[in-house]
Image (cartoon, rainbow, N blue to C red):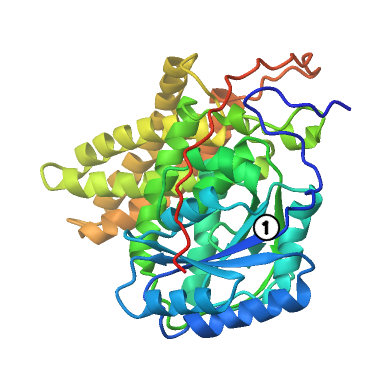
Amino acid sequence: MRTDSSPGTLPAREHLPATAAGTPVLDVVIPVYNEEKDLRRCVLRLREHLARTFPYAFRVTIADNASTDGTPLIAAELAARHPDVTSVRLERKGRGRALRTVWSASDAPVLAYMDVDLSTDLNALLPLVAPLISGHSDLAIGSRLSRTSRVVRGPKREFISRAYNLILRGSLQARFSDAQCGFKAIRREVARALLPLVEDTGWFFDTEMLVLAERAGLRIHEVPVDWVDDPDSTVRIVRTATEDLKGVWRVGRALTTGSLPLDRLARPFGDDPRDREITDVPKGLARQLVGFCVVGGLSTLFYLLLYSLFRQFGGSQAANALALLLSALANTAANRRLTFGVRGRGGAVRHQAQGLVVFAIGLALTSGSLAALNAATAGPAHSTEIAVLVVANLAATVLRFLLFRAWVFPDRRDPAPAPVLAPAVPAALSEPTTISTGDPR
């Protein structure tokens, strides 16, 4: 089995060698912003757990995100008192910015982070980093959505978390189960190749890092965790969700255009061929259904907004036709790439033409429903029109998926696989600039 690497690619995974004296094997980063109340207690608890259970040298790094309270003083005090604790001060906020800064400068071969509230049970820390130390995996994440996880949190956060991960599965074909759990680890050589490709500096940093790693064929290890929600969390859910959706759109567009040099993250062929089987075409009816439903839900919202806007300037039939036409064009384009994995411009015009035929069927259903409503009720209320259109669109959606799958985007792959060609050697990856944070002690 060949294990040598080509220029610009990651080397084959190996068990981490012994580090030099004084160099930790694990660097656990704790990003904080105005956490003077909990910082000391949580850091001491984490140190005690690592000293008792972790068989290698470790470091705890406090990454202060421009705190304005007593957090910097407490962090400096902890770093001065404990040789295995250090602190880094950043003058700008952003969890992703803090992780990028510390991880890029760290000399530890395994890098991790966790939230300061220690919502995740620390007994999962060793299972999280063990596959990275052994060379089995490239990244590791804690999952609150595993069947064996035990989670205590409110229904609102539970719904948002599951809905967000469903969106990732449908739009970006993500296979990992929990993008936003504040409990992750990564091998240093992977971080140095991956971080220059990650644009986000806030809460979407985790998701973008995982999506790019998965698309490059890197192995992500998931650990079921026990997790208790922090009722005093300062995370703004609505704002964070909005920024995350913007990030999903940006990353999806970059993957569609092929602008990301993911070959930089490739492991040498033969390291584990199963990790390289990241295909452009989503496999399986279930995966396509999820993608189609996500795209359909967003398209329906887009359609209803357009209809409500156009309805102010014209009749219901004209507003419905124009709104349905524009949303149908957007729906076909999104399903073409995200649901059925069709890349490039080849066949795009034909697909849109076929999509317009499907649109005509949907128009007939929705327009017929409106005509029936107007015949049954004189001057129906706007809310009634919306309700009827939603029902009609649901019926049209089922038919649209069947036509898309069987006629517009059929699976025309040859039954016999084509010979695998040797990949081109990518350009050498220049070493990313390391930001030295210094030791505040």
Residue at the (36%, 30%) spot, across then down: 329
Residue 106 in picture, x, y percent from top left: 57, 53
* Residue 374 in view: yes
Residue 173 occupies quadrant: top right
Residue 252 in picture, x, y percent from top left: 46, 38
Q: Which residue is mark 1?
A: 23
Quadrant where the N terminus sits is: top right
Does residue 197 appear left or right of residue 329 in this picture?
right
Q: Which of the two residues, 192 or 158, is positioned nearer the viewer here?
A: 192
Q: Element at badge 1?
A: loop
Q: Which of the two residues, 152 or 30, is positioned nearer the viewer here?
A: 30
Residue 64 in picture, x, y percent from top left: 41, 67
Residue 182 in picture, x, y percent from top left: 55, 65
Which amino acid type corresponds to the residue marked 1 in the rendered image? Thr
* Residue 393 in view: no
Q: Which of the two residues, 27 or 157, is positioned nearer the viewer here?
A: 27
Residue at the (41%, 48%) spot, across then down: 200
